[in-house]
């Protein structure tokens, strides 16, 4: 059985950045055309400008 990870080594900011990058990579790989800025913003949770 493996030992649990040491919480002192956990970097929540890095994990969040990896999650966002993964979303972009998955969406881009499945898209038939380049993603629009609106699509990218949506994937990243950015509110559209008015």
Image (cartoon, rainbow, N blue to C red):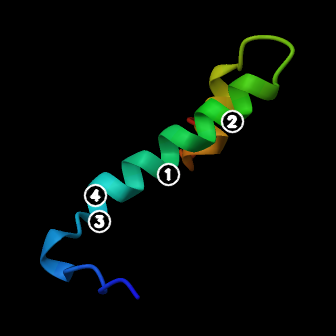
**Element assignment for label 2:** helix
Q: Is label 1 in contact with label 2 (beta carbons under 8 Å)?
A: no
Compute the Cα span from label 3 to label 2. Answer: 21 Å
The answer to whether residue 45 is seen in the rendering is yes
Residue 34, quarter of picture? top right
Q: Is residue 10 above or below residue 17?
A: below
Residue located farthest toward the left when viewing the structure as drawn: 8
**Crowd rating for badge 4 (residues with CA inside 10 Å; few <14, some 14–19, many 20+):** few
Mark 4–mark 2 CB contact (< 8 Å): no
Answer with mark 4 or mark 1, whichever residue precedes in sequence: 4
**Closer to the camera, 45 or 11?**
11
Residue carrying label 4? 13
- Vertical position of residue 49 compared to residue 10: above or below: above
Marks 4 and 1 sit apart, C-alpha to C-alpha, by: 10 Å
Name the residue beneath numbered marker 2. 26
Disc on the earlier residue, 3 or 2: 3
What is the distance, in whole Å, between disc 4 and disc 3 at their CAs? Answer: 4 Å
Give the percent coordinates (x, y) of residue 22. 56, 42
Do labels 4 and 3 touch, CB within 8 Å? yes
Say which quadrant the N terminus sits in: bottom left
Q: Could you tell me if residue 48 is visible in this image?
A: no
The residue where tag 3 is placed is 12
Q: CA distance from mark 4 to mark 2?
A: 20 Å
> Residue 25, position in %: x, y?
61, 31
């Amino acid at each position: 059985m493996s030992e649990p990870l040491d919480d002192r080594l956990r970097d929540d900011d890095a994990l969040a950045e990896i999650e966002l990058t993964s979303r972009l990579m998955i969406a881009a790989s499945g898209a038939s055309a380049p993603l629009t800025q609106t699509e990218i913003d949506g994937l990243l949770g950015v509110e559209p400008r008015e």
